[in-house]
Image (tube, rainbow, N blue to C red):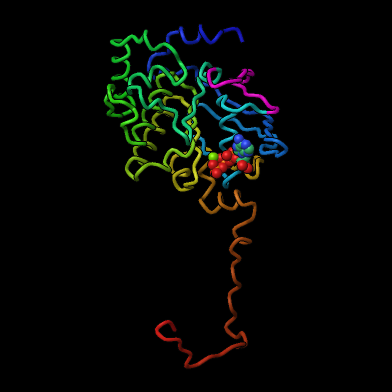
Amino acid sequence: MSATPETRHDARPPRPGAATTPEPVTLEHVFKSYGGTQVLHGITVEFAPGSVHGLVGENGAGKSTLMKILTGVERPNAGRILVGGREISVKSPADALHHQLSIISQELATVPARTVLENVFLGAWSSRGGLLRQGQDRRRFTELCERVGFQLDPDRQVGTLTIAEQQQVEILRAVSRGSRLIVMDEPTAVLTTSETQALLALIRRLAADGVIVILVSHFLEEVLAVCDTVTVLRDGRHILTEPAEQHTPDSLVAAMAGRSLELLFPELPELAEDAPVVLEARGLSRGQAV
Ligand SMILES: Nc1ncnc2c1ncn2[C@@H]1O[C@H](COP(=O)(O)OP(=O)(O)OP(=O)(O)O)[C@@H](O)[C@H]1O
Ligand SMILES: [Mg+2]
């Protein structure tokens, strides 16, 4: 890669939410082990531009690990990341940001002692503090908030915000960087019902602008309501990537568990009218219960 981290920070970030050329992002043959334990066994999956892509699987299936690899938080043992068919090098979160790949993790990454404005434009690891171009950044901040429909005070200290508001700060940061792909790992687990509805609506708007949104969630109805495509992982293996409309919560549960629902909850055969009586009881009682 030719650009150094310094030139990247100096490069003017794209206009708020300016769509980079919409291109597919692909993970190819991704392997990951921790110590002796293999947690990802050669995962290949393509994310289409402008789509909301659900990523589901049971606890420990490897969803977060795969998304951390996609966004430079973790390094794979093998495998490639491609944008528009060209391999990119993602060795750190800064590399991922350079390629407009962002993640909003289960563990939020805001700086509590800094203001909302600083958190949105500085990024957690940038050192541009003294050079903040206040006027310009405030205008961009207002534009951004209008675009995504958030009402945040730019001067509030982030540590005083609710979790939902801190999540909004991270979303603003990802959108302000012109992200082509935004991973949201269990974003609604910490939200109320109305906050969840607002976030799902925003996810759809981002996708309509060409962004790839990957939604990792245990709430299968929510996934099916908002996603175009759904990928199921099981024990670190890719099970399926299919249009969401082909699925129901039950079919996803079955794919996640690796057994058909019939095996999980076998259906009992219907009784024939003339079936012989094998047990008959009269006058059975047990207090109020029977
Ligand atoms: N830093 C780590 N060191 C060792 N093992 C890890 C580490 N991170 C994850 N694992 C293991 O890798 C496997 C996949 O974990 P991962 O967090 O990716 O699953 P997940 O699908 O996101 O699960 P959840 O739904 O619970 O968030 C698990 O067995 C987990 O214990
Ligand atoms: Mg996880």
Q: Magenta stretch: residue 88 in it?
A: yes
Image point (69%, 32%), residue name: 31
| Residue range (magenta) | 77-94
The part of the image, by quadrant, that contains residue 61 is top right
Q: Residue furthest right?
A: 36
Question: Can you give x and y, in whole percent of width and height, for residue 77 in the image?
Answer: 70, 28
Is residue 231 among the parts visible in the rendering? no
Is residue 162 positioned above or below 8 on the image? below
Is residue 116 positioned above or below 265 on the image? above
Is residue 284 positioned above or below 149 on the image? below
Question: Can you give x and y, in whole percent of width and height, for residue 35 in the image?
Answer: 70, 35
Q: Magenta stretch: residue 99 in it?
A: no
> Image check: 59 left or right of 173?
right
Question: Can you give x and y, in whole percent of width and height, for residue 155 in the image?
Answer: 27, 22
Q: Quadrant of the N terminus?
A: top right
Q: Quadrant of the C terminus?
A: bottom left
